[in-house]
Amino acid sequence: MNAPAVGFSVEDQVRSIGAGSTTAVELVSHARAAIEAHEPELEAWVQLSRSAMAEAADVDRDRRDLPLRGVSVGVKDLIDVAGMPTRAGSSVTPSSPVTTDAPCVARLRSLGAVIQGKTVTTEFGYFRPGPTRNPRALDHTPGGSSSGSAAAVGAGTVPLALGTQTAGSLTRPASYCGAAGMVLAHGTTDMSGILGLSESLDSLGFLTRTVADLRYVYDAFVSGRPSDPSSEETSVFVWGGSYLDYLDPTMIALLGRLPALLGDLGFRSEPLDWDDHVKTLADDHVTVMGYEAARKRAHEFDTHRDDLSPQIRDLLLQGREMPESAYSAALIRRDRSRDLLREILEGPSVIVGPAATGPAPKGLSVTGSPILSRPWQLLGAPVVVVPGARTVSGLPLGLQVIGSAGGEEYLFDVGEKLEAALRELSPMDG
């Protein structure tokens, strides 16, 4: 599939309804037609809503000021949507529909958004792939576990999708599929109605076509009104991945151009000298995730062990065998590193580095490595994935902007400018 045009922004779509040039029904109908046209090869959706058009008609009749009026949304199938089952990519979950929306879905509906349906996820948000293909190269993975949401947005079929992240479940598929993505700071939104793995790690996230759309959606979701760009000068720490894993030559080439690119955009930058902390955090993330997952998904392990995939079964088994002392020590180190990071990012400052080790790997049997997201997810940091860069073969390369809770506007300020510059860059050749 060819890369889609960025098209009308979320804000432009909402304004077009307000101006009378279109309606919510027309926008939702257009999105549904795009979904159905791409679905035979993309396989991004688990189930489509039968009531989307009726809900869009209700939105058209609603005279309130709705910041997401008529915006079509895909919802990752770990998140409850009333009238649909939450299967979590598994055969052991109930097939009966849930009766209420998760609070995050209810919030989007209250803002005028229309739910198009449920998108594919890996089993319980872990490593077993679903059927979804990468919209930029159908024989490459879309990543995991927010694969369906990222592919739907990356293909241009919907302007907004909900995802979640426990390790690299949103940042990686956003990077692979050429979408903008945001992982909300841990603990800043209600996670009830979301089937998760780890209370210390599970976070909600958004996927959109651009960082500007992310800012608009985030502002609507949090406060219902737009925010202004910060007038403060933001400093950037450039992170090279801390040698956590092998980086593809194309990603190395992109990181090599990053300091000069940031300078041209008016940002002061310096290398992030924090490798020891980052490596420890990556290891501790594995400990925390395994320990908590074994307890959160104990029912599935005890009653359906033989029906689970080897990937999730091994995670839960390893978590059960993990001593509590190792888990407690990992949390203590996390808290100390969180305090240190807060000091580093005063100023204001953000960190910019690779969102994935490189472009999406070829093949659909694996989902790629989440290693570059593990440290920041353990810290609960808000993250914005910036699209725009690409390889000579047209595969997307994403960067992530990492910050502190309460400083999300700095992520957007850097992300928007960086995205514009990345879209103008020549393709990366390793």
Image (cartoon, rainbow, N blue to C red):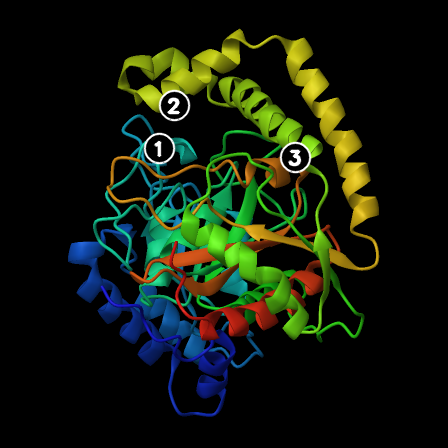
Label 3 Cα neighbours within 10 Å, binned few <14 / some 14-19 / many ≥20: many
- Nearest to the eye among marks 1 and 3: give it: 3
Q: Residue at x 55, y 41 (%)?
A: 373
Q: Quick one: SS at disc 2? A: helix
Q: Earlier in the sequence, mark 1 or mark 2?
A: 1
Q: Which residue is at 80% across, 60% downward? A: 348
The circle drawn on residue 347 is none
Earlier sequence position, callout 3 versus callout 2: 3
- Tell me if 43 is positioned left or right of 63 in this view: left
Task: State which quadrant residue 152 falls in.
Answer: bottom left
Residue highlighted by disc 2:
312
Label 2 packing within 10 angstroms: few (<14), some (14-19), many (20+) = many
Q: Are marks 1 and 2 in contact (CB under 8 Å)?
A: yes
Amino acid tagged 3: Val
Q: Nearer the viewer, mark 3 or mark 2?
A: 3
- Residue at the image position 54 percent from the left and 67 percent from the top: 211
On the question of residue 33 being in view, the answer is yes
Q: Is residue 188 left or right of residue 111?
A: right
| Disc with the residue nearer the chain's start (1 vs 3) | 1
70 shown above or below 364: below
Identify the disc placed on residue 278: 3
Residue count near mark 1 (Cα–Cα under 10 Å), binned few <14, some 14–19, many ≥20: many
Instruction: Tell me if 63 is positioned left or right of 265 in this view.
Output: left
As shown in the figure, which amino acid type bears the numbered disc 2? Answer: Ile
> For the residues marked 3 and 2, what is the alpha-carbon distance in whole angstroms?
25 Å
x then y, percent, for residue 32: 27, 67
Q: For residue 105, say whether it is visible.
A: no
Question: Quick check: 149 above or below 15?
Answer: above
Element under disc 3 = helix
Name the one closer to the observer, 1 or 205: 1
SS at circle 1: helix
The numbered dot on residue 123 is: 1
